[in-house]
Amino acid sequence: MAIQSPEGTRDLLPDEAKFWTHFKATAAEIFGRYGYLPIETPVFEQTELFVRGIGEATDVVSKEMFTAISGENLKKLLEGGSVKAKSRLSMRPEGTAGTVRAVVQHDLVPQGAAPAKLMYAGPMFRAERPQKGRQRQFNQVGIECLGAEDPSVDAEGIIMLMRFYAAIGIPVRATRLLVNSMGCETCRPAYREAVKAYMDAHADELCDECKRRAEINPLRAFDCKNPGCTAVMESAPKITEHLCDDCREHYLSVKTYLDGAGLSYVEDPTLVRGLDYYTRTVFEVQVTEGMGSQNAIGGGGRYDKLTEEVGGRPTPGFGWALGYERCVLALEAAGHAFPKAQRCDFFVACVDASVRAEAFSLVQACRDAGLVGEMDHQRRSLKSQFKLADKLGASMVAVLGPDELARGEVTVRNMQTHRERAIELPKIKALLAHFGGEPFDGRAPSVDEVFGGLDDAE
Ligand code: AMP
């Protein structure tokens, strides 16, 4: 059997790959209005970064990381040797740790500077059990803002994400925005203790995993999918009743900004999210119908202690990531299909092989003029060439034969109107040359713009 793609991965075939490009371009355009600039970081980092940044006890780090190892180091390990800490590498399971590492390494937020606003888009890797909406390689688009703790950063970050969903075609009414505050180092320790005490009192109703969580990170039990644990945790102490004054005010202010922007949201005091680094604001966006349990299309929050964890000076931060594949599922649930990628504006068909060189140069002139030009590369019959042009969605087909060439003409057929006429080759080439070279108005011209003048002349 032919080799298949690895479990939990997905090929983006051309129509979808085009959509992914459009998705990223839309993100860059919208987030650019909020001052966010792109950053590209490696897809693998030192394992230590994720252990320190995301947290050793998280599922993502303890169970789901893919190790990246060079052939040389693998050999060393297999022979019972060890490799240096800096050679222990992992594929990135998320984008925040790497972005924050880059901010610290390149000092992108010098003391007193404006916040660094960064966005990224690319693949993440988690060794999860694959299912619909849960992959081992998936794409995220994310933003990070480092250097400001004001609630306006959190609010604008959430607002721009919701604007993006709408722009990409996910109806706002199909989504639910959940918000919460997870407190800070002042108020969270006491809250954790309160949750731990509550869990200890209900230990016999909790799964083994949650009993372990009670010791290491009790708040993680809010994410347990076990129905018994969910029922117990519903009555657990709520963070909102334990926030210190500063955190309460910060949270209130975030909500006030969201209200002002007309966003509706649901406060969910059990929303803790799976990663260790969050402080204060956390949020998640879910799709309300058609996506089963994998209904989270994005989420994030504030992480005011993360830069210190990775060795930088104290720098408050806020960020989120959205899952591209989940957005595609949400779009499908809302009845969208990928628009078919336009494959051809102008097809040059050859009556026989003697005109191929002339056809080749005409197609090339089309491409230089900014049009999508194509010809047959398999020496098909004229009839099959027309079929191919049709399949590619060509709006015009030029037919070139020895007789036409001898007259210095080409027959051009408009595939919509089916009208045909002969045009002098030098005339068509001059027209194409007019659009070639310099970019036309900063963009590629349409076939109508190039050939519109010819229509008028008819
Ligand atoms: P997280 O980094 O876990 O907060 O995830 C952010 C977003 O990425 C989620 O809301 C999902 O939309 C998406 N996501 C997370 N894990 C996966 C996965 N294994 N497969 C597909 N999408 C994912």
Image (tube, rainbow, N blue to C red):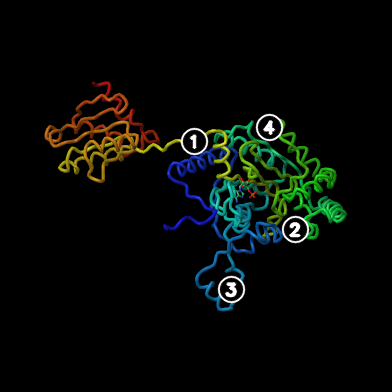
The span from disc 4 to disc 3 (Cα, nearest Å) is 51 Å
Q: Residues within 10 Å of mark 1 (few under 14, many from 20)?
A: few
Q: Is residue 427 visible in the rendered structure shown here?
A: yes
* Residue 289 x/y as whole percent: 63, 36
Q: Which residue is mark 1?
A: 337
Q: Which residue is mark 2?
A: 209
* Residue 295 x/y as whole percent: 64, 42
Q: CB at mark 4 closer than 8 A to ligand 1?
A: no
State which tag comes first along the sequence, 4 or 1. 4
Three-letter amino acid code at the position of disc 2:
Glu
Tell me the tag on residue 83.
Answer: 3
Three-letter amino acid code at the position of disc 3:
Val
Nearer the observer: mark 4 or 1; the answer is: 1
Quadrant housing the C terminus: top left
State which tag comes first along the sequence, 4 or 2. 2
Q: Is residue 102 visible in the rendered structure shown here?
A: no
Q: Residue at horizontal 57%, vertical 51%?
A: 135
Nearer the observer: mark 3 or 1; the answer is: 1
Q: Secondary structure at mark 1?
A: loop
Q: CB at mark 1 closer than 8 A to ligand 1?
A: no
Q: Quadrant of residue 453?
A: top left
